[in-house]
Image (cartoon, coloured by chain):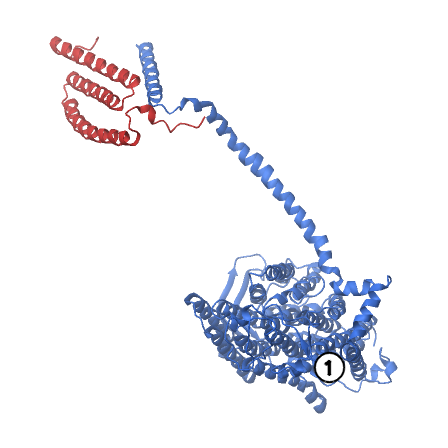
Chain colours: A red, B blue
């Protein structure tokens, strides 16, 4: 990372590591979301991508010496908790309709061929 | 007398300037009362009133309107027309270069002169009598259509009032359309019957054609004289020579023809007469009030009111006379061959309206207006008799299926009042119809115009036909041995209710059916109108006795129709009439000679009817068979029974091409506009969508992959740009 030297060397290492982990988390989440069809797994994958973004935010907050990044993450976690409750509730409802967690069961929004 | 000398040279000084009289503002009640009654009938309909209340409201308010008219007649001095300004209605003004073309004013004002009063007296008088008659006649529809019926009658009376009393042509037009609307509503009163709906549409459309003429006439009057108010119009006419911008000789000459078209539409003259016989689909009181006595005379009123405009254009009056006379003859011949008694009466109305136009055309507005006046009574009487017969005989109108009703219990009043109505219509000596008809025919001969003399002969022949077909009905229906069949309404509305009379234990099988005579309301009204029809002759008696113009003539002379009362009309000892068309009778005075010849024609017609329809009914059928079996004469009964095929001709010439054109346009609309332009345009996005449609396969992962790919592409692009920049 060729970043302006506004950070101490140790701090730069932490930021680099955090961003790397964030990228890894996002990639895992994306691959998981694209390859799996179980709706609970897909939901977990979106959570992974979400937390990757949160982690990146903390890292950039460190870069800019700004706590707003961390404040946002607190909010993100709160929203994610609420959203998780909602999404799992939705999954339960969808499961009751079709007796399956396969997302393929829900493909009615396509144009009739 | 030389030809055309009769054409009254319009002395504009004859029409005195109107006097603004706010003290007569209460004359507005004549318009307000029917309007109020219409609103109350609407309220009754909304509340679902199930009794005769709407009929009572209408009858009372119309009687009050009649009383108002009567007191107006008593109190108003006849020296000059009165203008009563009620409120401002249409008032536009603008800045213009010309001094007189800066405003368009049509206040809601009344123009009251003797012509107005004469008309309103019989309109409100007959209107209230017929409303009373209808309270009994329409009782079968109590609740369902009762309020609708009386509401429409009230609307009619309001509109007729505004037509006759309005102080300008815009108010006249409002009333003109209003009576057309009421007529449409009432012809289509039995709206579940397809023939009634068709008749209502026919009447409405035919009237629209005429109304176009009236509207154009009003436009031309405004653009030529700068005003639509009668008073201003007479003033502008007398200020001839003062030309105004926009006026032109040809458009001035065009005005009477436009107004004439309107009058012919409303008053059912050739070529727009075919709606009136069909209008008999409406309830009979409506036929009596609107389609015989009052509304159809609006055309005569229009021409009489704007007579100064017609007098400027003598050819227009000749056209009016020719059209009127041909209509009179044509419809009289049709009336001879119809079996439906209401239809015979309808054709006789068309025929009598033709006489009135003949009167206007040959220059006797007095004769025309007097005939309107007498005709209103006796024709209303005849229709109400037909209605009472129909009411009592379960809808029977075929004169072949009824006979000798005079001896049927309960039909006495009908039969004898019917006879009096028939005598008036036939122009039997010394009845009202005799005086009014003769004053028209006499003027045709007295005019000295050879064309008018021919029209006079045709009118005399028509008088013979009139007497024949009128008494054909009476002798068939009321004369002869008693014999009748019920109409097709035995199970219909007539017996859904309890008549409360003891003279008929009505049952629902036709073998047990027997006719029921009318009760008090119908019989009473028949008697009152019958007396009215007889009294309508009184002005003539008084005039003859006192050797002065009769009452109706005085009324006409004090109005804008005065231009049509030639001075020669007054002097009874007409030395200059020595060589009139009827000189062969040896009678010098053309009026007396006409009376004698016309009476002879009428009595001859009655005698022919006596022979064919009372003494020897088989002879009539034999004659018809003989005519039909002979190839040379076949056309005669066929033509008459089929009403000269006028409906068929109109169908072939106008309706069928319009129908074809309609279908062509429908095809163009469906295929070209809808099919090619609209749907064709919509196909572009449709086809475009079809190209991209495979992207939307419904699989969640597919969408996610597309989205991720998109983001990746954007990211790659941003990165590339960044690399380029650095």
Of A85 and B374, nearer the camera is: A85
Q: Quadrant of the N terminus of chain B?
A: bottom right
Q: Quadrant of residue B197?
A: bottom right
Residue A109 position, x and y percent, is 38, 29
> Could one spot residue B553 in this view of the protein?
no
Residue to which mark 1 is pinned: B434
B530 on left or right of B439: left
Q: Is residue B113 above or below residue B707?
A: below
Q: Quadrant of the C terminus of chain B?
A: top left
Q: Quadrant of residue A15?
A: top left
Residue B591 position, x and y percent, is 78, 82
How many circles with numbers are drawn on the protein? 1
Residue B60 position, x and y percent, is 49, 78
Q: Is residue A1 above or below residue B390?
A: above
Of B584 and B215, nearer the camera is: B584
Output the chain of dot 1.
B
Q: Dot 1: few (<14), some (14–19), or many (≥20) neighbours within 10 Å? A: many
Q: Quadrant of residue B385?
A: bottom right
Of B151 and B543, nearer the camera is: B151
B624 on left or right of B432: right
- Badge 1 marks a residue whose secondary structure is helix
Residue B478 position, x and y percent, is 69, 79
Residue at the location (80% across, 72% down)?
B458
> Could one spot residue B93 in this view of the protein?
yes
Residue sitting farthest toward the bottom: B545
Q: Is residue B529 above or below residue B86?
A: below
Of B489 and B87, nearer the camera is: B489
């Amino acid at each position: 990372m060729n970043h302006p030297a506004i950070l101490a060397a140790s701090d730069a290492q932490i930021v680099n590591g955090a961003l790397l982990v964030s990228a890894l988390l996002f990639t895992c989440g994306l691959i998981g979301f694209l390859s799996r069809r179980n709706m609970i797994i897909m939901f977990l994958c979106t959570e992974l991508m979400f937390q990757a973004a949160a982690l990146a935010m903390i890292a950039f907050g460190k870069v800019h010496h700004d706590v707003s990044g961390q404040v946002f993450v607190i909010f993100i976690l709160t929203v994610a908790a609420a959203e998780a409750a909602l999404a799992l509730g939705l999954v339960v409802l969808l499961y009751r309709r079709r007796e399956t967690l396969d997302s393929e069961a829900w493909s009615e929004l396509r144009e009739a061929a | 007398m030389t030809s055309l000398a009769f054409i009254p040279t319009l002395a504009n000084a004859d029409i005195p300037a109107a006097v603004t009289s706010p003290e007569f503002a209460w004359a507005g009640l004549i318009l307000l009362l029917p309007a109020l009654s219409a609103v109350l009938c609407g309220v009754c309909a909304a509340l679902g009133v199930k009794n005769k209340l709407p009929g009572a409201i209408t009858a009372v308010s119309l009687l009050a309107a009649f009383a108002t008219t009567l007191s107006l007649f008593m109190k108003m001095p006849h020296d000059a027309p009165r203008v009563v300004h009620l409120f401002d209605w249409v008032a536009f003004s603008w800045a213009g270069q010309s001094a007189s073309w800066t405003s368009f004013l049509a206040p809601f004002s009344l123009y009251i002169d003797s012509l107005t009063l004469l008309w309103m007296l019989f309109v409100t008088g007959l209107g209230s009598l017929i409303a009373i008659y209808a309270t009994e006649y329409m009782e079968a529809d109590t609740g369902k259509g009762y309020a609708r019926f009386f509401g429409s009658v009230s609307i009619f009376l309001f509109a007729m009032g505004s037509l006759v009393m309005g102080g300008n042509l815009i108010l006249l037009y409002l009333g003109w359309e209003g009576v057309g609307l009421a007529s449409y509503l009432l012809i289509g009163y039995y709206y579940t019957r397809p023939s009634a709906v068709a008749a209502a549409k026919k009447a409405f459309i035919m009237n629209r054609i005429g109304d176009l003429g009236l509207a154009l006439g009003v436009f031309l009057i405004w653009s030529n004289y700068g005003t639509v108010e009668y008073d201003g119009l007479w003033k502008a006419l007398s200020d001839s020579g003062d030309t105004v911008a926009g006026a032109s000789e040809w458009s001035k000459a065009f005005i009477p023809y436009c107004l004439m078209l309107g009058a012919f539409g409303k008053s059912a003259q050739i070529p727009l007469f075919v709606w009136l016989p069909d209008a008999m689909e409406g309830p009979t009181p409506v036929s009596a009030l609107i389609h015989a006595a009052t509304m159809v005379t609006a055309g005569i009123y229009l021409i009489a009111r704007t007579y100064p405009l017609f007098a400027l254009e003598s050819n227009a009056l000749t056209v009016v006379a020719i059209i009127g006379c041909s209509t009179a003859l044509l419809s009289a011949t049709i009336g001879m061959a119809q079996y439906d008694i209401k239809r015979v009466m309808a054709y006789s109305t068309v025929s009598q309206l033709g006489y009135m136009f003949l009167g206007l055309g040959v220059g006797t507005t007095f004769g025309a207006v007097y005939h309107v006046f007498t005709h209103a009574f006796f024709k209303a009487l005849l229709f109400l008799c037909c209605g009472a017969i129909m009411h009592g005989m379960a809808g029977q109108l075929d004169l072949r299926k009824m006979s000798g009703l005079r001896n049927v219990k309960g039909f006495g009043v009908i039969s004898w009042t019917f006879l009096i109505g028939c005598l008036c219509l036939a122009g039997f000596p010394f009845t009202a119809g005799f005086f009014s008809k003769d004053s028209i025919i006499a003027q045709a001969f007295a005019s000295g115009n050879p064309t008018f003399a021919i029209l006079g002969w045709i009118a005399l022949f028509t008088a013979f036909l009139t007497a024949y077909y009128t008494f054909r009905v009476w002798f068939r229906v009321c004369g002869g041995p008693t014999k009748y069949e019920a109409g097709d309404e035995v199970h219909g509305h007539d017996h859904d209710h309890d008549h409360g009379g003891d003279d008929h234990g009505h049952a629902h099988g036709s073998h047990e059916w027997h006719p029921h005579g009318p009760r008090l309301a119908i019989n009473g009204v028949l008697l009152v109108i019958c007396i009215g029809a007889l009294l309508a002759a009184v002005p003539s008696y008084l005039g003859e006795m006192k050797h002065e113009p009769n009452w109706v003539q005085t009324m006409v002379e004090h109005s804008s129709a005065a231009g049509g009362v030639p001075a020669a009309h007054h002097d009874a000892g007409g030395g200059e009439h020595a060589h009139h068309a009827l000189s062969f009778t040896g009678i010098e005075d053309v009026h007396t000679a006409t009376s004698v010849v016309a009476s002879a024609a009428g009595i001859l017609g009655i005698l022919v009817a006596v022979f064919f329809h009372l003494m020897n009914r088989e002879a009539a059928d034999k004659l018809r068979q003989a005519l039909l079996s002979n190839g040379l004469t076949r056309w005669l009964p066929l033509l008459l029974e089929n009403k000269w095929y006028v409906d068929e001709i109109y169908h072939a010439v106008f309706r069928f091409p319009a129908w074809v054109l309609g279908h062509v346009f429908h095809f163009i609309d469906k295929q070209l506009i809808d099919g090619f332009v609209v749907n064709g345009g919509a196909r572009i996005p449709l086809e475009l969508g079809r190209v991209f449609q495979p992207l939307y396969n419904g699989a969640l992962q597919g969408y996610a992959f597309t989205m991720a790919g998109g983001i990746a592409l954007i990211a790659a692009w941003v990165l590339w740009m960044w690399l380029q920049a650095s």
